[in-house]
Image (cartoon, helix red, strand yellow):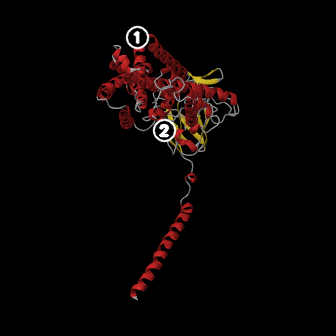
Amino acid sequence: MTAIVFLQWHKRWCIAVPCIVFAALSAFCAFLPAAAPPAYAASSTAKAVASCNPTASNGCVNGILQDAGKSPIAGATVTLSGVASGTTTTAADGTWAFSVTDDGDYTVTIDDAVAQQHGLASSSATVAIKKSSFDKQRAVVRFDQATAAAGSSGSGNASGLASGASGASGSNSSGTTSSGSASGSRPSSNIGMRIWQQLYSGIIFGLMLGLMSVGMNLVYGTTGLQSFSHGEQVTLGGLMAYVGTQLLHMPVVVSAVFAIAIGALTGLIQNEIVWSPLRRRHVGTMQQMIVTIGLSMALQYTFQFFFGGNVIGIVKSVPASFQLGPVTTNMPTVVSALIAIAVIVGVTVFLYRTRFGRATRAVCDNPALAAASGINVDHVVRIVWILSCAMAALSGVLLGIYLNGISWNTGATLILLMFAAVTLGGLGTANGALVGSLVIGIVADMSSLVIPNDMRYASALAILIIVLLVRPQGIFGKQQRVG
């Protein structure tokens, strides 16, 4: 009898206890929304800081106060008003910055006397910060240009410039903001001007991507290896340019040459220490590819350890923008595009008009036959690694100037786009990588006219899938018989 009573009591509590616990948890969860105020209910704040980098919780309103001769203006008072307010003083190099935590319009003002004394076109500027994508919101304010047309969509209607400066978002200081609107303070209703601006930005980004992808494709053609660490060579070039300009105080051109030399040296070291021994041991390309993944991770966190997790600028001055037909651009962007075109044309001439270039193409087509013909395959592969890493370092320098910053993972965020460009153009073909890069760049930037800016790379990858369904070998790839 005692056992029966105990079992009945135990059965009731086995049912009652879970019900009580469930009811308590339900009441607690129902209480949470009322007890915890929403994050956006906090009051707007703006904090004056020495330097600002956008994160998921804050945006940036910053700039460099310079006179008409591009000399820094130190000790000037800069006032922020609008959604939040604050006051700061420009540093010795003219820099100033505010960290903001709420979206909306912000007005930046300097004294009229300072503006008149230094020949500035305006003493106030208004920019917009969108809380939905704080990690890409860096509004760079300028006072050295005339006030733009009214009715701007928040791109800096009196500042002349407000740009998205996320690590490798594809936005740039002369192209589009992170909200997808064209820079240069154009009315957002002018869809024709926006189309031209996005097309121009897509071509520029495609050229940068092509400079990275051509070298990657040459490595694949000669060794059969798809290197996941190629993106880190891009990052290395940008970081070495930062070291040259900001730490060693060298001119930008000298810093670029320094970065390219470091990139070429790392290509030689990689081949001699890692890839050449693996090839001699007949390690398969799949195993080598796994090694590149480990090398990529090791390099990324090495960069983060030495340079931090913030976006760092190769140059600090804000270039003056100008009108080039229907688009707004600046001189560093134009020069970077011309350099990319010149290097790509030079590599093409090298491959098709020189003896070593013909040897490289022979190795790409058939390494065994090339070796039987007397070509030193190991020497060709060594030169290709050096050339590939040097081109990647150059692209990192140009990309850092174009995006107004470089970070420890810039190359890693672009590696999938490089693979897409190489695959789209045709594996092992240098010209195919360039064409694939242009297609990816143009489609990605043009698609931001109709879809959210953060989704623009998805459209480029969709184009890749469609093309490969029609032509599996890529645009310039050769059909290969299987079986």
Q: Quadrant of residue 277?
A: top left
Q: Amino acid at mark 2?
A: Asn
Q: Amino acid at mark 1?
A: Arg
- Residue with the most extreme front position: 483
Pointer 1: what residue?
A: 355
Q: Could you give the CA–CA distance between mark 1 and mark 2, rounded to whole angstroms?
A: 49 Å
Of 254 and 334, which appears nearest the observer?
A: 334
Q: Position of residue 7 (x, y in %)?
A: 42, 82
Residue at x-position 69% and y-position 28%: 192
Q: Position of residue 239 (x, y in %)?
A: 41, 29
Q: Earlier in the sequence, mark 1 or mark 2?
A: 2
Query: Badge 2: how crowded within 10 Å, few (<14), some, or many (20+)?
Result: many
The answer, for residue 143, to whether it is visible in the render is no
Residue 151 is labelled as: none
Of 354 and 141, which appears nearest the observer?
A: 354
Q: Position of residue 49 (x, y in %)?
A: 48, 40
The answer, for residue 152, to whether it is visible in the render is yes
Q: Quadrant of the C terminus?
A: top left
Q: Secondary structure at mark 2?
A: loop
Residue 53 is labelled as: 2
- Image side of residue 68 versus residue 18, left or right: right
Q: Secondary structure at mark 1?
A: helix
Figure label count: 2
Of 69 and 327, which appears nearest the observer?
A: 327
Of 392 and 382, which appears nearest the observer?
A: 382
Q: Quadrant of residue 190?
A: top right
Residue at x-position 45% and y-position 15%: 351
Query: Badge 1: how crowded within 10 Å, few (<14), some, or many (20+)?
Result: few
